[in-house]
Image (spheres, rainbow, N blue to C red):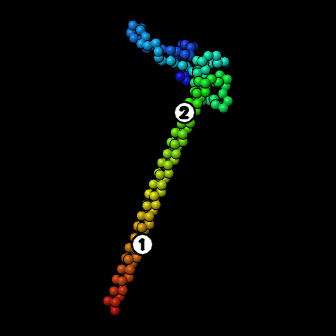
Amino acid sequence: MAENLITDDSEYVHHYKVRDEQGKTFTQHGGIWLLELDKFKANRIESEDQRWLQFFKVGEQLNDESLPDWMITQEMKQAMSTLNTFSEKERQYHQYQARQEYLREQRTILRELEETSRELLQAKLREELALQEKEAALAEIERLKALLENKDQ
């Protein structure tokens, strides 16, 4: 845990076992380990437990090119490799998500542009049709005037 859950105890490692109502332990193996990383403070790493606690606490900030002395064990190198693999996969996942979001935005922009173009084209066609109708109406007026003039003569 990154924050303290048990505030009335200064210990940072808590091991809980599964027991029945009579207090008999279900199994000697397993249980729940609660590690309160905020409580863990060590100037020197002196045990394997402390090594893991420190790794859990600062692992993401470590540079695998220049690991501190307490990290120079086969297990810690493997843990660092696993952390890097997960971190790389997470970066790739976020890059993929960002790319998908970019493509969604581009498709939305393209649809909006197409819709706007279609609306502009329809408006232009309506204008041209209205102009043609006006010209036809004016031509009909001129034809009717000519008929009237011919009838009056």
Question: Which residue, as the protein is rendered here, is positioned at the far top?
Answer: 22
Task: State which quadrant residue 59 falls in.
Answer: top right
* Residue corresponding to mark 1: 131
Q: Which x, y percent locates residue 145?
A: 36, 84
Quadrant of the drawing holding the C terminus: bottom left
* Residue corresponding to mark 2: 86
Residue located 36% across and 80% down the image: 140
Residue located 48% across and 55% down the image: 110
Foreground mark, 1 or 2, reads 2
The three-letter amino acid code for the residue at tag 2 is Phe
The three-letter amino acid code for the residue at tag 1 is Leu
Numbered disc 1: secondary structure: helix
Is residue 60 in sight in this rendering? Answer: yes
Task: State which quadrant residue 111 falls in.
Answer: bottom left
Relative to 94, say whether 57 is above or below.
Answer: above
Q: Is residue 153 left or right of residue 32?
A: left
Q: Which x, y percent locates residue 116?
A: 46, 58
Question: Which residue, as the protein is rendered here, is positioned at the far left?
Answer: 151
